[in-house]
């Protein structure tokens, strides 16, 4: 959530920021509502102060007049009673006016809050402007020794690559038909060494970030209250992508949602809390099952393990002081961690600077990492894929946007309470990562070599052979 004071001072910044992100929100109406709300709030507080002052003043006066009634004659009694009515009417009138103002504020508040939650965080000035993901800017690429990204897979390795769909079938790594039978479209069942490889990749990434980078391992619930989804910025804009558990219809007090990332639980941990500055930065990592409706159109490049409803992800979150330089530092560190993992896995990748239109509502900046997947891309004259990049990681810098929504603050050395900054990044998501892993490490005989960093998690297995395929 943006700072309403900042919006009042410089509304054009937020109007331009929303336009650059292709997000439609009526900021003019919000400012009008905000002005009314502030006016009514100011009048209410003035009336409350007046009510308090009058109560102190008229109390003794009423007591004195009531005492005079005991010895007053008929004419004096009428005068005293008239004064009493007048004195007692003042606080009643103020109370009525305060109630009216309360009702006016209550009427405005829902729309005021709804619009405020919709205003995106403006992109940083150094983020390139663009109209879609097509305008993202490639920062750099990496390729393992012996592989040249300027050449085709066949030119590099001497044989035509198989897609991950062919490989998982021949190696018995997954069963899509039975996954669909059990749960519907875009579901799957990893089998045999497919499940082991999936777990090995997750364990490798989790151990690395915990042991080598000192992130605190943390489990999180994936069944989430709506407040946490709103607080982390996934609602209201991402509501259509979340699975909704309508507990209220079963007599429960509130509905629940299946989280699409462990980030929601990690950030929600400290909502409505005031931390000590010495606790920062808080570095957390989790591995969790994630759920997304993935309502987009299906196609060859989204088939198999690429765009699915359920997956597992190692996620990293940093909560740090309210300092742009420190936020930028942690953003770079997160990207280094993800790059280290991909280098050890031997998967070519590239870093993309997301343009303004591809940032989403909550991010001031975002860097995507895409891996090279030989089985994706346009088909050539022989019906063979040319290879293409596919997103596997996304590192986001949010400043205080989430922390404001979550009311997460820290107390500095001077005793001031300040909204913290937050960042997040995918360490590794599987089974999507298995696509480039299998396709890049396939051998001409149909086997797949296992990267050395994963072998300890595969009980020393170094190669997946077609003859090892499970019967599924």
Image (cartoon, rainbow, N blue to C red):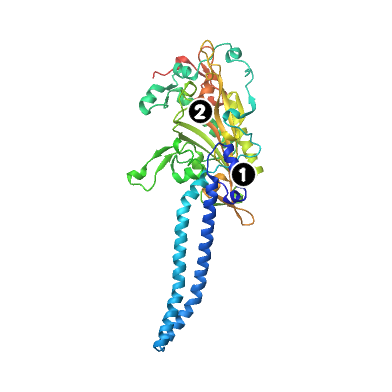
Q: How many marks?
A: 2
Q: CA distance from mark 1 to mark 2?
A: 46 Å
The answer to whether 75 appears left or right of 369 in the picture is left
The x and y percentages for residue 297 are 46, 26
- Whether the residues at callouts 1 and 2 have beta carbons within 8 Å, the answer is no
Residue drawn at the location 61% of the way across and 14% of the way down: 156
Report the front residue among 86 and 21.
86
Within 10 angstroms of label 2, few (less than 14), some, or many (20 or more) residues?
A: many
The x and y percentages for residue 120 are 55, 42
Quadrant of residue 241 within the rendered picture: top left
Report the front residue among 204 and 294.
294
Report the front residue among 332 and 209.
332
The x and y percentages for residue 339 are 61, 30
The x and y percentages for residue 365 are 60, 37
In the image, is residue 129 above or below residue 387? below
In the image, is residue 464 above or below residue 247? above
Residue found at the very far left of the displayed protein = 250
User: Of callouts 1 and 2, which one flags the residue occurring earlier in the amino acid sequence?
Assistant: 1
The kind of secondary structure element at disc 1 is helix
Within 10 angstroms of label 1, few (less than 14), some, or many (20 or more) residues?
A: some
Quadrant of residue 319 within the rendered picture: top right
Q: Which residue is under mark 2?
A: 200
Q: Which residue is under mark 1?
A: 13
Q: Taking the image as drawn, is residue 398 in sight?
A: no
Report the front residue among 50 and 425.
50
Residue drawn at the location 48% of the way across and 79% of the way down: 60
Q: Taking the image as drawn, is residue 92 in sight?
A: yes
In front of the other: label 1 or label 2?
1
The kind of secondary structure element at disc 2 is helix
Classify the position of the C terminus by image quarter: top left
């Amino acid at each position: 959530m943006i700072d309403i004071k900042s919006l009042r001072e410089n509304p054009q910044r937020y109007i331009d920021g929303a336009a650059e992100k292709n997000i439609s929100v009526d900021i003019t109406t919000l400012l009008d509502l905000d002005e009314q709300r502030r006016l009514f709030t100011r009048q209410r507080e003035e009336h409350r102060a007046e009510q308090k002052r009058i109560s102190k003043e008229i109390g003794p006066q009423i007591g004195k007049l009531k005492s005079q009634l005991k010895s007053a004659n008929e004419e004096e009694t009428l005068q005293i009673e008239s004064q009493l009515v007048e004195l007692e009417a003042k606080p009643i009138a103020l109370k009525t006016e305060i109630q009216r103002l309360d009702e006016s504020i209550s009427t405005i508040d829902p729309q005021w809050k709804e619009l405020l939650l919709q205003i995106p965080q403006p992109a940083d000035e150094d983020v390139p402007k663009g109209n879609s993901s097509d305008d993202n800017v490639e920062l750099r690429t990496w390729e393992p020794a012996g592989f040249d990204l300027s050449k085709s897979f066949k030119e590099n390795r001497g044989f035509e690559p198989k897609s991950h769909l062919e490989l998982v079938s021949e190696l018995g790594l997954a069963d899509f038909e039975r996954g669909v039978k059990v749960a519907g479209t875009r579901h799957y069942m990893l089998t045999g060494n497919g499940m082991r490889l999936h777990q090995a990749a997750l364990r490798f990434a989790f151990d690395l970030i915990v042991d080598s980078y000192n992130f605190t391992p943390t489990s999180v619930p994936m069944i989430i209250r709506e407040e946490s989804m709103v607080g982390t910025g996934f609602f209201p804009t991402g509501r259509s992508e979340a699975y909704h558990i309508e507990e209220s219809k079963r007599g429960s007090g509130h509905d629940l949602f299946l989280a699409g990332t462990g980030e929601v639980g990690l950030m929600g941990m400290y909502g409505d809390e005031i931390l000590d500055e010495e606790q920062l930065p808080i570095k957390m990592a989790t591995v969790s099952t994630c759920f997304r409706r993935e309502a987009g159109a299906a196609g060859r490049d989204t088939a198999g393990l690429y765009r699915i409803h359920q997956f597992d992800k190692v996620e990293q979150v940093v909560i740090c002081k309210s300092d742009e330089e420190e936020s930028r530092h942690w953003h770079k560190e997160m990207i280094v961690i993800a790059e280290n993992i991909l280098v050890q896995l031997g998967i070519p990748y590239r870093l993309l600077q997301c343009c303004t239109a591809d940032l989403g509502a909550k991010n001031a900046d975002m860097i995507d990492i895409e891996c090279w997947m030989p089985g994706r891309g346009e088909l050539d004259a022989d019906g063979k894929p040319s290879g293409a990049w596919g997103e596997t990681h996304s590192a986001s810098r949010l400043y205080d946007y989430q922390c404001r929504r979550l009311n997460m603050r820290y107390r500095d050395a001077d005793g001031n309470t300040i909204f913290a900054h937050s960042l997040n990044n995918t360490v590794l998501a599987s089974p999507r990562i298995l696509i480039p892993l299998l396709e890049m490490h396939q051998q001409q005989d149909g086997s797949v070599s296992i990267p050395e960093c994963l072998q300890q998690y595969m009980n020393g297995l170094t190669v997946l052979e077609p003859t090892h395929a499970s019967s599924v």
